[in-house]
Structures are given as structure tokens and as C-alpha cells.
Image (cartoon, rainbow, N blue to C red):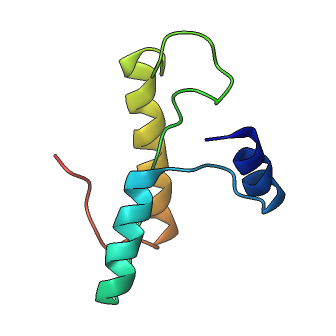
Amino acid sequence: MTRAQLAAYAGAAVAAVERQAASLFAVAAARGTAAGIIAQVSNAVDYSGQPFDKGHAIDSHAVLEGRWKGIQHSGTSNCAPAP
């Protein structure tokens, strides 16, 4: 992604770009159904460390588990997490 593209997206208040999620939402829209995603950001565009460094796996799991509990508590989901 170019600096100009990043600036354009930032100007449109886009916080992140994730192609697989975009595909999921496009298929859901075409089928007339709802879709959702929980994503964990691994690296910022200007990050110079190891690619896809999310920290320790236990921390990643705890973050995702907490998000899922929040979704369940809010009553906005009628689906279950993958085993």
C-alpha cells in the first residue's frame, strides 16, 4: 500500500485494512446475511520488528477470549466460537 493510499484511507477514518475480512463481508452481503470478525492486529505499517509478532500466544488467547465474552454478554451474537 502506498503512502498516498494510506493517507486517503486515514482521511476517510478507516482504522484498518484486512482483505480476508473484506471477502467475508462481501460474501455475506451478496447472500443477504450478517457477518462478523474479531481481528488481532499483529504489526503496524511502520513496524520494523519481526513480521506478525503478536506477543505471547497466551496473551493473544486471553484477549480474544475476553472479546468473545463481551460479545456474548452484549447479546449481539447468535453464533458460537470454533472449538
| Residue sitting at x 35%, y 65% | 24
Q: Position of residue 11 (x, y in %)?
A: 83, 57
Q: Position of residue 45 (x, y in %)?
A: 64, 30
| Residue sitting at x 77%, y 59% | 13
Q: Residue furthest right?
A: 11
Q: Position of residue 23 (x, y in %)?
A: 37, 64
- Judge whether residue 72 can be spotted in this image: no
- Compared with 77, 8 (above or below) is above
Residue 34 sits in which quadrant? bottom left
Q: Nearer the viewer, residue 14 or 56?
A: 14
Q: Residue furthest bottom?
A: 32
Residue 2 sits in which quadrant? top right
Q: Nearer the viewer, residue 39 or 59?
A: 39
| Residue sitting at x 39%, y 82% | 29
- Compared with 27, 70 (above or below) is above
- Compared with 57, 68 (above or below) is below
Residue 34 appears left or right of 51 = left
Q: Nearer the viewer, residue 38 or 7?
A: 7
Q: Residue furthest left?
A: 83
Residue 47 appears left or right of 66 = right
- Judge whether residue 52 can be spotted in this image: yes
Q: Position of residue 8 (x, y in %)?
A: 77, 55
Q: How many marks?
A: 0
| Residue sitting at x 69%, y 51% | 15
- The quarter in which the N terminus is drawn is top right
Q: Nearer the viewer, residue 62 or 19?
A: 19
